[in-house]
Image (cartoon, helix red, strand yellow):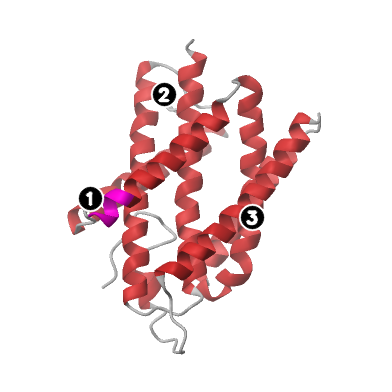
Amino acid sequence: MIGRSGNPTLNEKTFEREERYSGQERMSINGTVNKTFITLTILLAGAFSAWSMYFNGQDVSAYAIGGALAGFVLALIISFKPTAAPYLVPVYALAEGLFLGAISASYEGLYYGITLQAALLTLSIFVALLLAYKTRIIRATEKFKLGVFAATAGIAIVYLLSFVLGLFGVTVPYLHSNSLIGIGISVIIVIVAALNLVLDFDFIEHGAQQGAPKYMEWYGAFGLMVTLVWLYVEILRLLSKLRSRN
C-alpha cells in the first residue's frame, strides 16, 4: 500500500485507483522533479505578472480572488481525475501564480522585503527537509503520517470554520491576531505545512517504485506544489504578524 499523505491531493487511494492503467511509460522521480520545475516556473511567471501590475498602480484584487477560485476548482478536478493532470496542472499553476503574486505584492506594500524573506524561508525549509528525507534523518513512518494527517485535517477544519463564521461577522479568536498566542498558532501551522513535504516526498517515491502511469508525474508535481504554496502563504502570514508588532 502506498504511504498515506497529509496533503489532501496525495493519498494512498490515488495510486491504487491508477493501477488499472497499463502502458510502457511509467512514473519516475526524475520525471516528477522535471514536472515540478515546469509548474513552479509557470507559477512564478504568473506571480511576477500580478506583482508588476500591482506596483504599476493597477488593482490586482480580481487576480487574487479569481486566481484563488480558479485554483480551487482546478484542484478539485485534478484530484478526482488525475488523467487530466498533464493538461490542467499548468493552468492551475498559472492561476495560483496570479493569486500569490497579488497577495505577495499586497504584503510587500505593507512590509518591505517580507516576500523575499518568505520565499527564502520556504526554499530553505524545502531543501532542508528534502535532505533530511533522503538521508533518512526523518522517516515517514505510519505514526508520523497519521499524526501529520490528523494535524492537517484539524487545521483545514479550523480554517473552514473561520470562513463560515466570518460570513456572519464572527472571528475565531487568535487565529489572525498578532498576539503571542496568534503567533504561536501560526508557528504550529507552518510546522505542520512543512512536515507535509516529507509525506509528499515519501508518496512520490513510493509511486515511482509502484510503477504508476507516466501522467502521474504531473499529479505528483501538483501535490507538491499545493504544499509549497500553503507553506509560503503561512510563512508570509507569520512574518506579517511579527512585523506588525514592531
Q: Are marks 3 and 2 in contact (CB under 8 Å)?
A: no
Q: Residue furthest bottom?
A: 23
Q: Are marks 2 and 1 in contact (CB under 8 Å)?
A: no
Residue 23, compared with residue 204, is above or below; it is below
Q: Nearer the viewer, mark 3 or mark 2?
A: 3
Which type of secondary structure does the marked residue at label 1 adopt?
A: loop
Q: Which mark is residue 42?
A: 3
Q: On the picture, is 86 further left or further right than 130?
A: right
132 part of magenta stretch: yes
> Can residue 79 be seen in the rendering of this structure?
no
Q: Residue furthest top?
A: 246
- Which residues are drawn in magenta? 131-135
Residue drawn at x 37%, y 57% as measured from the top left:
200
Category of crowding for the residue at label 3, using alpha-carbon neighbours closer than 10 angstroms: few (below 14), some (14–19), many (at least 20): many
199 part of magenta stretch: no
Q: Which residue is mark 1?
A: 138
Secondary structure predominantly adopted by residues drawn in magenta: helix
**Amino acid type of the residue tagged 1 in the rendering:** Ile
